[in-house]
Amino acid sequence: EVQLLESGGGLVQPGGSLRLSCAASGFTFSTYAMSWVRQAPGKGLEWVSAISGNGGNTYYADSVKGRFTISRDNSKNTLSLQMNSLRGDDTAVYYCAKTAGGSWRSGWGDWGQGALVTVSS
Amino acid sequence: DIQMTQSPSSLSASVGDRVTITCRASQTISSYLNWYQQKPGKAPKFLIYAASSLQSGVPSRFSGSGSGTDFTLTISSLQPEDFATYYCQQSSSVPHTFGQGTKLEIK
């Protein structure tokens, strides 16, 4: 059974930093692209970032480019999102997600339970 | 970036009704269109990929169609557990943009 467990969320001041982690199990982690998707309170889903299975390719939404960094450790089956220069509009539940198949284009088939990030003074 | 527009934004229906949600892409995305269901306080659930392929375990009352820029999600006979918010998402190119969501409510 695929399991994705996010951690690292919390309250941070504007301009601060936070690192989210996603512990994966139940599948061969290194063979799947992974992503982060967020949802601001009462709002819709926003794709944030994605990384290929070997970590060689990374992609970001314009809203986080230059501030967030996605990475993965395939030896530890862990996905990470380093978030710097946080702003109020970064407040959201952050989900990690796994591709449904071997391709970026196959959709995001499995999701974690989410980690809440609140940016406020 | 490709913009995804869903309609309607909200919909009231009754158990047993047939409902259709539409999703339009701002440019052609072939069949790289996915649908998700989300219930309050829960993570999204993957329903349909490649516009019309049902994810394993998803009831057959759900179906998807379309290609190019226009897509639909149809629920043939609404069940109580289907009342939720539905999102389309394109996976043709990054960023993998979502539609704004369609909230399906009980009439």
Image: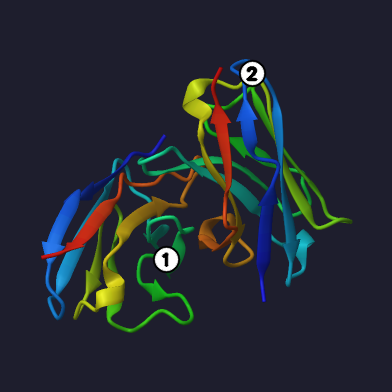
In this picture, residue A100 sits left or right of residue A4: left
Q: Residue at x 19, y 81 (%)?
A: B77
Residue B31, quarter of picture? bottom left
| Closer to the eye: label 1 or 2 | 2
Residue in view at x 30 percent, y 50 percent: B101
Please name the amino acid that badge 2 sits on.
Ser
Which residue is located at x 26 percent, y 67 percent? B83
Q: Judge by depth and name the residue closer to the eye, A54 or B47.
A: B47
Please give the chain letter of the residue carrying mark 1: B
Dot label at residue A85: 2
- Mark sitting on residue A51: none
Q: Please tell me which residue is depicted at 51% across the width and 31% down the height of the picture.
A: A91
Helix, strand or loop at disc 2?
loop
Instruction: Please indicate, yes or no, whether residue A45 appears anywhere in the rendered image.
Output: yes
Measuring from the top left, give residue A66's x and y in whole percent.
64, 22
Type of amino acid under label 1:
Ala
Q: Which residue is mark 1?
A: B50
Q: Is residue A72 above or below residue A11?
A: below
Residue B63 visible somewhere in the drawing: no
Residue A48 place in picture, x, y as percent? 54, 38
